[in-house]
Image (cartoon, rainbow, N blue to C red):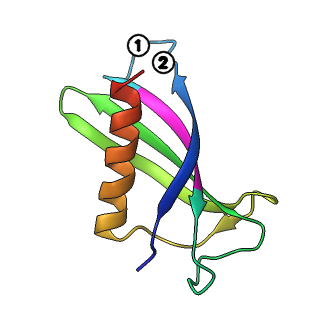
Amino acid sequence: MIELNITGHEVEKLEDPFGLLSGDRYEFFLELEVDEEDELYSEKGVGLKCIFVHDESGDKITSYHFFERVTEKVLDFEFEEDEEELVLNYCKNIVENE
């Protein structure tokens, strides 16, 4: 299990110029602190890019990937259920408080 500690973020609301998509979409870049013992750890830092969707059917993460922050190299890891819930709640809280 990856211990995710979110230490910062950047967020941008994505525009739908043609109005084809329901709800609002946000692109998040999360800064993560990862224990040196964790297989996800990188001396170059670890980040998470995700697309968060907020609409009438509920909130969800539609895509994501972990990456090295210095090189932007994509890391091949997947969420565990509790990690996805943590990120979802974090994104939801940010969007609701903007």
Is label 1 in a helix, a strand or a loop?
Answer: loop
Q: At 33% from the left edge and 26% from the top edge, which residue is drawn?
A: 96
Residue that mark 2 sits on = 16
Q: Residue furthest bottom?
A: 37
Residue that mark 1 sits on = 19
Q: Is residue 81 left or right of residue 9?
A: left
Q: Quadrant of residue 70?
A: bottom right
Q: Is residue 56 left or right of residue 53?
A: left
Give how far across and how far down residue 11 sits, in percent.
55, 32
Contact check, label 1 and label 2, Cβ < 8 Å: yes
Above or below, 53 against 82 in this view is above
Q: Quadrant of residue 80?
A: bottom left
Disc 1 packing (10 Å; few <14; some 14–19; many ≥20): few
Q: Amino acid at mark 2?
A: Asp
- The residues bearing labels 1 and 2 have C-alpha atoms spaced at a distance of 5 Å
Q: Amino acid at mark 1?
A: Gly
Give how far across and how far down residue 76 sits, in percent.
58, 73
Region in magenta: 25-31
Q: Nearer the viewer, residue 49 or 43?
A: 43
Residue 26 lies in the magenta stretch: yes
